[in-house]
Amino acid sequence: MLSELRRYVVGWLNYFGISQAYREIPAMDQWLRRRVRMYYWKQWKRARGRRRNLIRLGIHPAEVYKATRSHRGYWWMAGTSIVQRALDNRWLTERGVPSIRQQWIEMHYGQQNEQFNPAAVNLTGTAGCGPACPVVWEAGG
């Protein structure tokens, strides 16, 4: 499943990646990760398997009990804090889930050195001091 997903993401980015519109990319990346969390939650099927996997991933047994006994749907459970802490972004990356955001940034800005940090890239278009910087004009200057 993950190899197919990587292939779709690469194909999608090759087609739509030339766009400069970054605004939709983080939302799509979040949606993709939630969808993969839903896939894993659905794959675990029974409460016993979900309990075993959540405890193995470091969630406290009292919290696990609440999550495994819930009758909510798969999508809702994939958005809960318990499942998000267990299947965090680091864990998903280790499993090979592609990051649309990171690939888009690398496509547009390149990976110029080994210490490249996609989270530090300023994509707001401002000078890095917030949403807008006041400019003071001096008369006669």
Image (cartoon, rainbow, N blue to C red):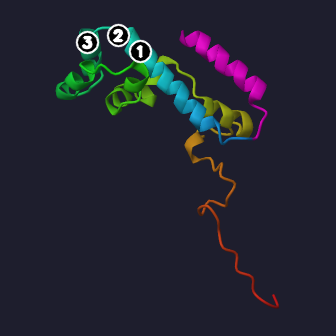
Say which element carries label 2.
Answer: loop
Q: CA distance from mark 2 to mark 3?
A: 8 Å
User: Overall secondary structure of the magenta stretch?
Assistant: helix
Residue linked to disc 2: 44
Give percent across and percent down for residue 40. 41, 15
- Residue, disc 3: 47
With 115 as the anchor, is 60 left or right in this view? left
Residue holding disc 1: 40
Q: Earlier in the sequence, mark 3 or mark 1?
A: 1
Q: Amino acid at mark 2?
A: Trp
Q: Is residue 23 visible?
A: yes
Q: Is residue 66 left or right of residue 20?
A: left
Residue 117 visible (yes or no): no
* Residues shaded magenta: 1-20
User: What residue type is disc 1 on?
Assistant: Tyr
Residue drawn at (44%, 19%) of the image: 38
